[in-house]
Amino acid sequence: MKKTSLILSILAFVAAVAALVMTLCDVKLTPKKTAESSLEDTSNITAQAGDIVYVQLDSLIANYDMFNDKMTALQSKMQGMQEELAKRGRKLESDVKNFENQINKGLLTRSAAEEQQAKLQQRQQNLQNDAAQKDAELQEEQMVLNNTVYYAVKEFIERYNAEHQYSLILTTSGATNTVLNDNPGLNITADVLKGLNEEYIKTRNNSREEEE
């Protein structure tokens, strides 16, 4: 391999490492939804058995303690992964620049340069593979989190309606607004959220007591 072609190869490699570090910093989870508006006071609910009522799903999830606890833990894990990968990326970039400097000064034989280049390229590939694997893990955990919250809400509403006996419970959100002209008294979001959080906090406290 000629010196000029080797240097060009290394320059391209440096650019690839820099791009990789930027990619690692862009790994993101699905962000938490923000409540569209403040929840109505439960005293405003006037719905009776047999009524059609609705739940503002995005507001409900954004204020559900289970969702926020699990999302906080997942975001903390994501941050740790990002920091570890970014640290490895910066070290690799530094080593590549040092290698380029040695090449420019003629401090390496051809065979030594080719061997060191191969090792650096393998480190880059390993880093890319690890980043892709960790991203896939986070996406999977996000899906499990979403499913866990969804079924917790669904099962609670089933129990909730066994008591209240509404004929139909609709869900609405900013993205899919199925309630275009509503009666605030039919909005049961605050009452459902209150029950969800009370149930979750009780379960969470019991779990902590068992661990202690």
Image (cartoon, rainbow, N blue to C red):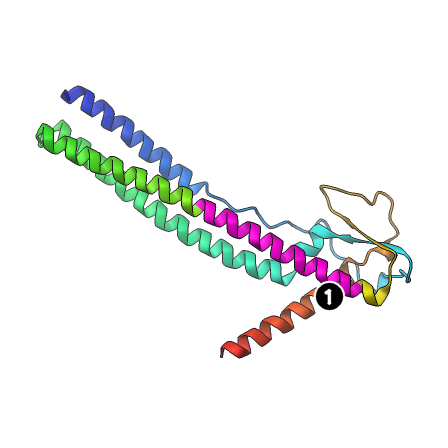
Residue 29 part of the magenta-drawn span: no
- Judging depth in this view, the residue of 103 and 196 nearest the camera is 196
196 left or right, relative to 47: left
Residue range in magenta is: 135-160
Residue 104 at x, y = what percent? 14, 27
Which amino acid type is shown beneath numbered disc 1? Lys
Q: What residue is at 51 percent from the left and 49 percent from the top?
A: 140
Q: What residue is at 59 percent from the left and 71 percent from the top?
A: 204
Which residue is the site of mark 1? 194
51 left or right, relative to 63: right
Residue 13 at x, y = what percent? 28, 30
Q: Quadrant of the N terminus?
A: top left
Residue 153 part of the magenta-drawn span: yes
Q: Quadrant of residue 120?
A: top left
- Judging depth in this view, the residue of 76 and 146 nearest the camera is 146
Element at label 1: helix
Name the main secondary structure of what is drawn in magenta. Answer: helix
Residue 24 visible to an observer of this rendering: yes
Say how many tags the image has: 1
